């Protein structure tokens, strides 16, 4: 392989690679076949801008980029051929053509990742090459928590671009939590008027004595959400919204106190939480709460066309329900098995409600505890077990075990990792992560839709911190999710590192503030911040 063909994620097959086969220039024409118009738009907006070339429409010129849908290829698969006569990208669908266009961009070199041409008129040499490729998993996800720290819309659009560059295709949008509600719901304006702001934030791990004494917040209007969803769709990324119930709901209760357990505490005294961890303030199991959240989900369904809707379901503390006469009466009336039965009742209600509207529920693995409708799916986060149980019970599953792919966890044990929390999970650890549990039978393995990396943002207050935690590990994760890698111990990490040398150039051109291989740069350190978990505490914040 020669310089310029160090692709990430690695394709299934790559033949050739000799440089200097042909060049893009101002005569290069773009021939977009039926169904590939969106890919052509993307090519002009990105590669057109980076090269300064017009890439005007044109056919049979002998100097063309030819895009075509070929239903004989796998749905997201593509075949990219560059030879003396053309650049040809055929895909099993528009998505396949789009992933082929991502590979094409990598072949042009790092400057193809800039937003404007450095030297208009320079040559853009391409190798002679044939790449045949298709993904291992249909769900190649990234979760972004915008509750703990809000990421303004432009930052989200930028992350969608970064996902596309790595052939990731599911954006799990964690929109609500104890520390902030981030999506406008027209019928409940206080969710964002009151629920999207907190007075101050804990700086570092929850055991840190440091506070950031300034208000933090923000939210997406419904038009912002429509723009994000449309931008993602142009990049063949599905946006799966998460509205977390019945726990992780303090921001909603602070906005609408009647949603909380009013017979246990004075919920009118609650504010959006300023600390990290798991709040004891959870939703009251009342008909009023169900109707309120049906109203929320009605607007969510209008905004998000995705098949899956995430309802959270994780870490719901049961103390208030134990103390609440209303909750206890509900348990009695419905004949439930204690407070765990109440949690299951909540999830089951929205499982049925979403199924009746043609959508599928997905939730964190705690939702398995109460029995689920057949179409419901599980995000396995507390290790592999939830995923194993779900797949054995015939449910689809997305593997995102915290021990492996929680990218808020530190990537090195060194003293100068910024605000270190959680397990040490290095680039190599992520590269050797295997999403499919070996205990599953072949039939059960088919329930593993794919895998997802999760970015919880308690200690990531801005883009640069998110970039630092995500990269370069997200590149390794993308290869795990896309490429046909061998078993973890047999994976060629040295070859991945060699290809990463080229990839760092692409990330530099994209302006990604990744963790350099030699460790954080001086400005990336956070000296003096108490970020480590206390003795005996769980590793995540
Ligand atoms: C989670 O990390 N609580 C899903």
Image: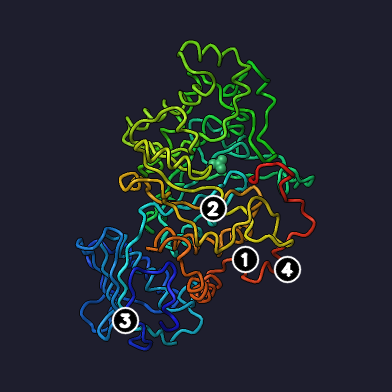
Give the position of the N terminus as an image quadrant. bottom left
Disc 2 marks which residue? 404
Disc 3 marks which residue? 28
Of discs 2 and 3, which sits in the foreground?
A: 2
Of discs 2 and 1, which sits in the foreground?
A: 2
For disc 4, the neighbor class at 10 Å (few under 14, some 14 to 19, many from 20) is: few
Disc 4 marks which residue? 522
For disc 3, the neighbor class at 10 Å (few under 14, some 14 to 19, many from 20) is: many
Question: Ligand 1 is found in which quarter of the picture?
Answer: top right
Among the two numbered marks 2 and 4 on one chain, the one whose residue lies closer to the N terminus: 2
Say which element carries label 1.
loop
Disc 2 from disc 3: Cα separation: 44 Å
Say which element carries label 4.
helix
Between residues 102 and 447, which one lies in front from this camera angle? 447
118 displayed left or right of 517: left
Of discs 2 and 4, which sits in the foreground?
A: 2
Disc 1 marks which residue? 515
Disc 1 from disc 3: Cα separation: 37 Å
Between residues 298 and 165, which one lies in front from this camera angle? 165
């Amino acid at each position: 392989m020669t310089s310029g063909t160090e692709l990430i994620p690695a394709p299934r097959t790559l033949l050739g690679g000799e440089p200097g086969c042909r060049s893009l220039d101002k005569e290069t024409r773009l021939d977009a076949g039926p169904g590939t118009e969106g890919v052509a738009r993307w090519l002009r907006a990105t590669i057109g801008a980076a090269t300064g070339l017009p890439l005007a429409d044109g056919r049979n010129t002998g100097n063309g980029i030819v895009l075509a849908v070929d239903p004989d290829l796998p749905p997201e698969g593509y075949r990219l051929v560059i030879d003396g006569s053309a650049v040809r990208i055929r895909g099993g669908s528009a998505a396949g053509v789009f992933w082929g266009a991502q590979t094409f961009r990598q072949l042009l070199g790092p400057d193809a990742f800039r937003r404007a041409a450095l030297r208009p008129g320079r040559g853009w040499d391409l190798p002679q090459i044939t790449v045949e490729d298709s993904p291992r998993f249909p769900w190649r996800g990234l979760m972004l928590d915008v509750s703990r720290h809000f990421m303004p819309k432009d930052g989200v659009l930028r992350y969608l671009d970064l996902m596309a560059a790595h052939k990731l295709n599911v954006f799990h949008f964690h929109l609500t939590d104890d520390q902030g509600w981030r999506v406008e719901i027209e019928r409940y304006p206080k969710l964002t008027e009151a629920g999207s702001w907190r007075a101050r934030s804990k700086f570092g791990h929850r055991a840190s004595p440091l506070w950031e004494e300034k208000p933090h917040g923000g939210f997406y209007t419904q038009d912002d959400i429509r723009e994000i969803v449309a931008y993602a769709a142009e990049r063949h990324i599905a946006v799966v919204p998460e509205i977390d119930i019945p726990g992780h709901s303090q921001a909603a209760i602070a906005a609408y106190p009647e949603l909380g357990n009013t017979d246990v505490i004075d919920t009118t005294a609650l504010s959006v939480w300023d600390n990290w961890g798991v709040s004891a303030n959870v939703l009251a199991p009342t008909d009023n709460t169900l109707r309120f959240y049906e109203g929320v989900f009605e607007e969510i369904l209008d905004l998000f066309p995705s098949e899956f809707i995430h309802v959270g379901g994780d870490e719901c503390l049961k103390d208030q329900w134990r103390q609440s006469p209303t909750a206890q009466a509900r348990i009695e009336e419905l004949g439930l098995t204690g407070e765990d039965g109440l949690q299951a009742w909540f999830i089951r209600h929205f499982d049925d409600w979403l199924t009746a509207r043609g959508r599928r529920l997905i939730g964190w693995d705690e939702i398995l505890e109460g029995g689920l409708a057949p179409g419901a799916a599980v995000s396995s986060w507390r290790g592999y077990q939830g995923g194993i149980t779900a797949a054995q019970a015939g449910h689809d599953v997305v593997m995102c075990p915290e021990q492996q792919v929680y990218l808020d966890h530190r990537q090195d044990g060194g003293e100068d990792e910024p605000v270190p929390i959680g397990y040490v999970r290095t680039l190599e650890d992520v590269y050797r992560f295997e999403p499919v549990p070996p205990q599953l039978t072949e039939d059960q393995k088919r329930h593993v839709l794919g895998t997802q990396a999760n970015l919880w943002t308690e200690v990531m207050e801005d883009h640069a911190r998110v970039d630092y935690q995500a990269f370069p590990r997200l590149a390794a994760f993308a290869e795990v999710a896309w490429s046909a890698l061998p078993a973890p111990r047999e994976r060629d990490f040295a070859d991945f590192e060699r290809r990463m040398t080229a990839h760092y150039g692409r990330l530099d051109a994209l302006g990604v503030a990744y963790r350099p291989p030699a460790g954080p740069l001086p400005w990336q350190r956070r000296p003096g911040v108490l970020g480590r978990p206390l003795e005996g505490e769980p590793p995540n914040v």
